[in-house]
Amino acid sequence: MTAPAAGSPASPPPDSIPIGEIGVAQGCGVLRMLVGSCVALVLHAAHHRACGVAHVMLPASTGRRTSPGKYADTAVAETLRLLQEVTQDPDVSCTAKLVGGAAMFAFRGGVPIGEQNVTAIERILGERGIEIVGRDCGGGHGRRVIVDVATGAVTVATAEHGTQTL
Amino acid sequence: MTGADHDHERFAAAFHRGAEDASAALATWLDRPVTLVVERFVSLPIVAALAALGSGEEPICGCAMRITGAVSGVLLLAAADRAGLALAETLLERPEGSCTSWGELERSAVIETANIVGCAYLNAICAALGPERADGILPSPPIFLRDYPEPVMEAALLEQPTAADTVLLAQTGFVIDGASFRCGLVFVPDAASLAALVNDGVEPGPRP
């Protein structure tokens, strides 16, 4: 079973999660995305064989109410809510995996936006007591992310840095 | 035509001039016909803009230049991997099919191309801006990239200091010596420079 992506309740979500969106699925199948500076936030509820995946773009919503998947602070809460909905378990227990947050150009000084995304998500997950059990973050390259919904296994492929499974 | 349309048209004219000048500069360097044509000059939602360099899972190659000053943003020159290697073969005067991976020489050839094309483009934009604003435009040295197309565009968009939901793209076709190569040149201005350019207007100026 696949639940609607946030913001598009009437249409079934594709396997590929667009930037700023959230996909949730249960039972079987995969969810996928390509990330550079963005972060793939994967919440896996092993007991229910279900996953929620957010394609997070920026660290803070600063009060914006639309596109909850776009911002770290709203994406964690919304992905968890959708996971509760699809599993019909308000106390759903899950673990997290994070992929992405690269600094692909490094033109600018200061903390790269990718690192800010990762830091924000880690902080929010910590506040909610959600354990991070896998991560492949940082570096200067993009990543192709494929999430096995049933097992929560996350395959991360790159153009020049090989493939691994988290 | 609305005022916004008129501003958009004037801004687009500056990029068309940039494409002409980049064609001439590259043709002089390579000593063969080169044509860059602005194919699309559009405002797009971010999701649509991500596909500007392609949407497949095959890697692309190319270069990125950070532009700062009166116009700020990221200039991307990108091509399918095989097209980029074919470009390197031409630039290095090697036989067709002889470049099969990205070594130092191949990367240098593409970086030099990006430098020439990017600077010619920027000179034309400087001319359009007028002398009082043009002095402040500064390109970074090109960075070579080989990666999936969507993360490259995503990074270019997030490099901008804005959370805007739409971006402006100038997408350019790039043909050397007939139809041998297809490359894309995409300019992603930041929101502040886009607003300044549209508000102030840009006229195609004299050639630099």
Image: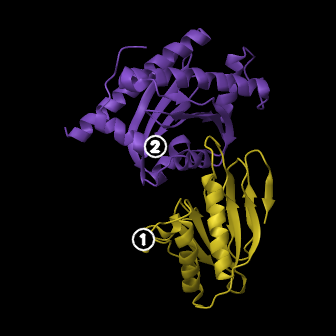
Q: Which mark is residue B190?
A: 2
Q: Chain of mark 1?
A: A
Within 10 Å of disc 2 (Cα), the crowding (few <14, some 14-19, many 20+) is: many
Seen from the viewer's position, the closer of residues B86 and A107 is A107
Locate residue A166, reporting x and y percent: 78, 66
Residue contact at pointers 1 and 2, CB within 8 angstroms: no
Q: Is residue B33 visible?
A: no
Q: Chain of mark 2?
A: B
Within 10 Å of disc 1 (Cα), the crowding (few <14, some 14-19, many 20+) is: few
Q: Is residue A82 visible?
A: yes
Q: Amino acid at mark 1?
A: Arg
| Secondary structure of the residue carrying numbered label 2 | loop
- The residue shown at (66%, 49%) is A103
Rendered view: A75 above or below B181:
below
The N terminus of chain B lies in quadrant: top left
Q: State which chain is coloured purple.
A: B
Identify the image's colour scheme: rainbow, by chain, secondary structure or one colour.
by chain
Locate residue B160, reporting x and y percent: 51, 46
Q: Amino acid at mark 2?
A: Asp
The C terminus of chain B lies in quadrant: top left
Locate residue A163, reporting x and y percent: 79, 55
Kindly indicate whether the residues beneath marks 1 and 2 are on one polypeptide chain.
no
What residue is disc 1 on?
A: A65
Tell me: A90 left or right of B96: left
Q: State which chain is coloured yellow.
A: A
Rendered view: B45 above or below A68:
above
